[in-house]
Amino acid sequence: MDRMKNNLCVLQNLAMASILAFAALPALAVSQALVTVGTLQVSSEDLDVAMASSPFANQMTSMDEDDQAGLRGDMLRRLVAARLLTLEARRLGLDKTEAYQKEMENFRLGLLYRFYMEKLRERIVVPADTLAAMKKQFKGDADGMTAAKAAYVNGQYQTLKLVTLQNMLKRDQTKLFEERIKPGIKAETVLMEGSSFRISYGDIVDVREHPVLPNPEWVKEQLYNRGEMLLAAKAAEKEGIDISGKLEQYQSERLPSVMMEAKTKEWIPDEKTMRDWFDKHPEVARIPERRHVGQLVVATRQEAEALRTRILKGESLFTLAGQYSIDPAGRKQNGDMGWIAEGRGMPELDNALAKLGDNQVSDVIETKVGFHLLTILEHQAKGQKTYAEVSDRVRQMIINEKLPPYLGELERSYPVSWKVIKAREEKAPRQPEK
Amino acid sequence: MFGARNCLLIFAAFAVAGTAFAGSDTGRDGGGTDLKTSATHAVEGEKIHSLSAMGLDGATHSLADWRGKVVVLNFWATWCSPCLSEIRDFVIYQEQYKTRGLQIVGVGLDEEKKLRNVQRTLEINYPVLVVDLKKNGTLMESWGNNSGMVPYSVVIDRDGRVAYTHHGQIDRETFNENILPFLGKATPDLK
């Protein structure tokens, strides 16, 4: 573990410093570059967008300033890592592979389809008399009103979508060859054809994954979906719907993942790599002993001894903890500390717990906090998980081990410059490197 | 939609828990003070008698502080996603309509520290009162909200009468239709 920590690259040290700088950084009205990574950059807007779509976006609103700054710093570090991976992926030509190009094209078509259908939906207006009736019925009930409006729009949308698609099929003189969906079908067999597009069997079914024809009904469904998507996407293109921004954003998120997938294959080429790692790190599968602990803490040994005598005479440690414990959280819970795994907490207490049987009361234990009395309500024995149970974790641990030095290497090829530190360094001194 | 409903249900559970523990002293140091509020239910058209509570500014506020203004009493909590979304809009409305007599007043049903953090992060430009739910378990009920769900808003007109109540997030359309008509023309100061 220590070696791993020492391996943490400059990137992380810099990110730590940026966290400090962030604490004093006000929200910026205009987007500015926070970090440049080779030829790319991370702007304040990029960071805001990433934070807004993160799972902790709402929770963050009520956090303390330092915690918010910490999360922003952490996200910034992730965005910098993503830029490094993007640059390396481009250098290796991972964005030029057939699979990547096909994925991007499918995403582009899907996006065009969605935008076209959204525009179709936006054209639907709830008639004034219907709207008035809804308002009367759902006065003061925002959710009810929203649901009623959505139900009306949905109904109209389904009809409009059907009519629009039928018109498109007619206009494009689309021909359907469903009878060709039968055993022996080839990837190049054309199943749908119009004046502006053609769909072959290989476009909708991965023949490597399905060497034998799967359920024909499922194939037909794929065909209709693909046809619908292509027609709507073509119509969207004709209308000049611009999706370049969204496409760029998707690529900036996807390319780092593709790079990571490639590196992961390199780091973990086979199952044996994982098993070897597992054999060297058996602690990853260890289940520590867990104890349901009761605790009472007081300020003097004399008081602790007196309370211990009362407990041995039959009084409850929990009741006394609720009255006398100097630990506010412990007092609030009447001394019930919940389940604690071995190795956690102060070593003096952990050692004492290791020797304690169920429902016994410990001797008085002195720590820097005070004088403690402990009891264990119940034990859960230690154990060992199997390789199969922890294989996902093993995989992640290998990646966690390999990634920081790899990012460090990338940083030597693509220099990272932290503008946020430069902007604030006079007010926020950098944290000394450990 | 699912997120919003989830949020509301959690609140309902919390409100029940608050009531259940109301009689026991758990030693929790809630930042809020007791709300002195009339038991009158907030029915549209009825006159509100009194309301006073400590604000995040440290001063005790009462509805009388904003007499002559159109008050939007907005009940919210920091864990409620629609509440936070609504507050972002309220900050804009308050700035936009302050000269027309709009006074939004937040009623934060949460820990003072968290409320203060939200106030800072979202740059809330109107008063936020702090309410300790354990001491005020039936507060929202007395303001016409029996479900215990947030966000919930009560609009009080210039005469001190409940003009409108709203369950859920107030969107622009709802604001325009149900609150805007109570506001007057812009004046320099309506204190």
Image: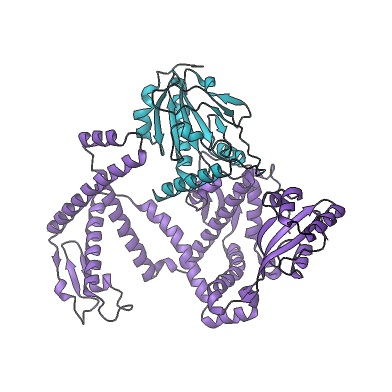
Please tell me which residue lies in front, B135 or A125.
B135
Compared to A292, does B117 lie above or below? Answer: above
Identify the colour of chain B in the image.
cyan
Compared to B107, does A423 lie above or below? Answer: below
Image coordinates for residue A418, horizontal then vertical, percent? 61, 51
Please tell me which residue lies in front, A140 or B19.
B19
> Residue at left 65%, top 54%?
A16
Drawn side of residue A338 relative to residue A218, left or right: right
Drawn side of residue A294 relative to residue A396, left or right: right
Please tell me which residue lies in front, A142 or B186.
A142
| Residue A366 seen by the camera | no
| Residue A369 seen by the camera | yes
> Residue at left 28%, top 34%?
A135
Please tell me which residue lies in front, A15 or A412.
A15
> Residue at left 48%, top 16%?
B188
Image coordinates for residue A269, horizontal then vertical, percent? 51, 79
Image coordinates for residue B18, horizontal then vertical, percent? 55, 43
Drawn side of residue A222 relative to residue A4, left or right: left
Figure coloring: by chain
Image coordinates for residue A307, horizontal then vertical, percent? 81, 55
- Count numbered badges in the picture: 0
Q: Residue furthest front?
A: A313
Drawn side of residue A18 relative to residue A374, left or right: left
* Res. B152 image quadrant: top left
* Res. B131 image quadrant: top right
Compared to B32, does A239 lie above or below? Answer: below
Which chain shows up in purple? A
